[in-house]
Image: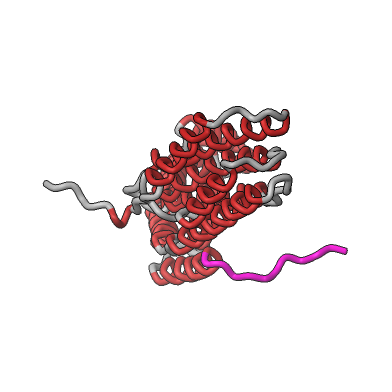
Amino acid sequence: MMSLNPYRIGFRTIKTAVGMALGIIIAKLMGLDNFASSAILVVLCIKHTKVHSLQAIVSRFVSCLMVLILGSIAFNMLGQSAIVLGLIVLFFIPLTVVFKVQEGVVTSCVILLHIFNASVIDLQLFYNEILLLIVGLGIAFLMNVIMPSLDSNLKHYKQEIEQQFTYIFEQFSNTCKKPNNNVNIAFDELKYTIRKAKSIAFRDVKNHFVRNENSYYHYFDMREEQLELLRRMSIIIENIETKDCLLSKISNLFAEVATNVNSNDYTVLRLHSLYEIRLELNKLELPTSHEGFRTRANLLQLLNELEAYLAVKSQFGSLRLHSDQKPAAT
């Protein structure tokens, strides 16, 4: 049985509806012919981000100017027939590709049909179409300037990911106390959450004309790199076969990391604790059994992976938001 998607009115839908209504009202009040076409321009130019919207507006404006000039000349010389219309489109679309404004082809075809249906092709028609473009594209730009802030979403994802990381280290700590237990962690789900957060951070960059990066994006990228190290650590922990005198200290180290996942200054302290364990490990005599030897080797590898995890965070530093950055002194 076919299931229906839940009914929902999004922010972009509201902007589109308001923009279409405003476009028609303003164009009609200005006494423009084909005033309803301004609504089409609004629909085609409302995007998810401000940067994409501005690119779409520029592309459509340039392509419409091109088709206005080309259509006016061709129809005046060859007549307003369907064959001439087809020839114009045949040459116009490759031309938009050359000038990299092919995104405006649909909008341009609307303008071209206005010229095709016009009783007289003159400067008045040209003036009318230019005003239609200004009204439609202008309202679309104003609608896209109104973008909801994504900061709350990004903070929510940051907290959710840090909570999951805390849970993972707590599981590692508990498993080290009782070897031979499976570490049941949904790494794939957490990876999907991180990638979703990265996509929102990237979209936030496109909502600002003067910003070319987002600290949250680099933060989530850092967490994704750490997640792969956590996945490898879980495999090592599951392969620990016997108890070892260092397991309790490694368990305590995991517990310390768990309580400081969201801290920006914990890395050096945890690395110091890790080096102390490694020095102690180097002084211990080698185990006499095969199981004990394999366990000791796994512990050494586990410390290496944890060191790499802490090094990734150390290289990242702290999360600096765009609003926190001070302008350069003049």
Residue drawn at (51%, 29%) of the image: 282
Residue span colored magenta? 1-11
Would residue 5 be counted in the magenta stretch?
yes
Q: Which residue is drawn at 44% across and 53% down?
A: 204
Residue 115 seen in this snapshot: no
x and y percent of residue 228 in the render? 59, 39
Q: Residue 251 at what x, y percent from top left?
A: 56, 49
Decide: is 287 above or below 125.
Answer: above
The rendered magenta stretch, by its main secondary structure, is classed as: loop
Q: Is residue 146 above or below residue 52?
A: below
Query: Nearest the camera: 14 or 93?
Result: 14
Image-based side of 35 in relation to 231, left or right: left
- Given the current orientation, which residue lies at the most extreme left position? 330
Residue 89 at x, y = what percent? 58, 38
Residue 282 is inside the magenta segment? no
Q: Is residue 219 left or right of residue 86?
A: left
| Foreground of the two, 240 or 89 | 240
Q: Can residue 48 be seen in this view?
A: yes
Comparing 156 with 297, the one in front is 297
Out of 108 and 326, give the one closest to the viewer: 326
Q: In which quarter of the image is residue 5?
A: bottom right
25 displayed left or right of 86: left
- Total marks drawn? 0
- Percent position of residue 148, x then y: 44, 64
Q: Name the residue rendered at 49%, 39% in the picture.
A: 277
Residue drawn at the location 53% of the way across and 49% of the way down: 254
**Quadrant location of the N terminus?**
bottom right
What colour-coding does the image apply?
secondary structure
Quadrant of residue 286 within the rendered picture: top right
